[in-house]
Structure formats: structure tokens, C-alpha cells
Image: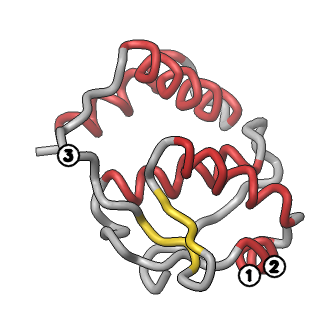
Amino acid sequence: MTGPTVRVDTASPVPPYEQIRAQLATLISSGRLPEGERLPTIRQLASDLGLAAGTVARAYRELENAALIRTRRGAGTRVAPPPPSAMRPSPEELASLARRFRDEARALGADDSAIVGALRSVLADAD
């Protein structure tokens, strides 16, 4: 992985494996990590982040279960090809994502008005 880096905030209420999973999922779905891009080994990423290998392994396992990455013996872990048909997130997936955003924003001290304002601002800039 030569592009964007993953960061973990140890003071966050969000578990480190979830921070890794969410950041990599975002990088993959946005195209910033393209199909075929090789990810660091579990040991390497754990060492880089100062975490236990099991923490990174859990994040990778969840990304594999979501078909975002593939691990092949001898070839390493790479970004998987996109599914044949464009998948839309379910309402439950969007609600889960919104809850994580809310929780992280509140942990930073943001109130509901600031959280909604930030989301509206991001949506307005998306195009």
C-alpha cells in the first residue's frame, strides 16, 4: 500500500480493529485503494500502528467477509475486484455507519447540531 495511510486513535471509544476496517473500507470504496493494490501484511501493519497482530487480523477478516479484500498464500492481501453489479448499502448498514459517525463526533465533543451540519457540508461537497 503506497498511497493513503491508516491511523488509529487509541483515545477513541471506537475499537482499533473497527477504525482500521472502516478506514480501509472507505479507501477501497472511494477508489483511493484500487483493485489489486497490495495491503501490508498483518504483522507489518500491526507493527506500524503499534497494535497486536490479532487486532489487524480481525479488521482484515471483516474486510474479507465483506469481499473488499482477498488474501492468497504467496500473493499477499490485495484489494478485491468490485462486485459485478453495483451494490447499494442497506438501510441497516447506513444506520450503523451513521451511529459510528455520531459516536466518534460526540467523543470529540460535538453536539447534534454540529454533527448534522458537518454531514450536510460533506454531502454538499460530494459532487
The image shows residue 67 at horizontal and vertical percentages of: 45, 48
The image shows residue 82 at horizontal and vertical percentages of: 28, 53
Q: Going by the picture, which residue comes out furthest to the left?
A: 127
Q: Which tag is nearer the camera, tag 1 or tag 3? A: 3
- Secondary structure found at label 2: helix
Q: Going by the picture, which residue comes out furthest to the right?
A: 52
As drawn, the label of residue 47 is 2
Q: Are marks 1 and 3 in contact (CB under 8 Å)?
A: no
Residue visible at 60% across and 50% down in the picture: 21
In space, the residues marked 3 and 2 are separated at their CA atoms by: 35 Å
Residue visible at 53% across and 21% down in the picture: 96
Q: Are marks 3 and 2 in contact (CB under 8 Å)?
A: no
As drawn, the label of residue 9 is none
Residue named by callout 1: 44
Amino acid type of the residue tagged 2 in the rendering: Ser
Q: Is residue 78 above or below residue 118?
A: below
- How packed mark 1 is, by other alpha carbons closer than 10 Å (few <14, some 14-19, many 20 or more), is few
The image shows residue 37 at horizontal and vertical percentages of: 40, 77
Amino acid type of the residue tagged 3 in the rendering: Pro
As drawn, the label of residue 84 is 3
| Depth order, front residue of 52/19 | 52
In space, the residues marked 1 and 2 are separated at their CA atoms by: 5 Å
| Depth order, front residue of 39/10 | 39
- Secondary structure found at label 1: helix
Indicate the quadrant containing the C terminus: top left, top right, bottom left or bottom right. Answer: top left
Q: Are marks 1 and 2 in contact (CB under 8 Å)?
A: yes
Amino acid type of the residue tagged 1 in the rendering: Gln
- Residue 88 is drawn in which quadrant? top left
Mark toward the start of the polypeptide (1 vs 3): 1
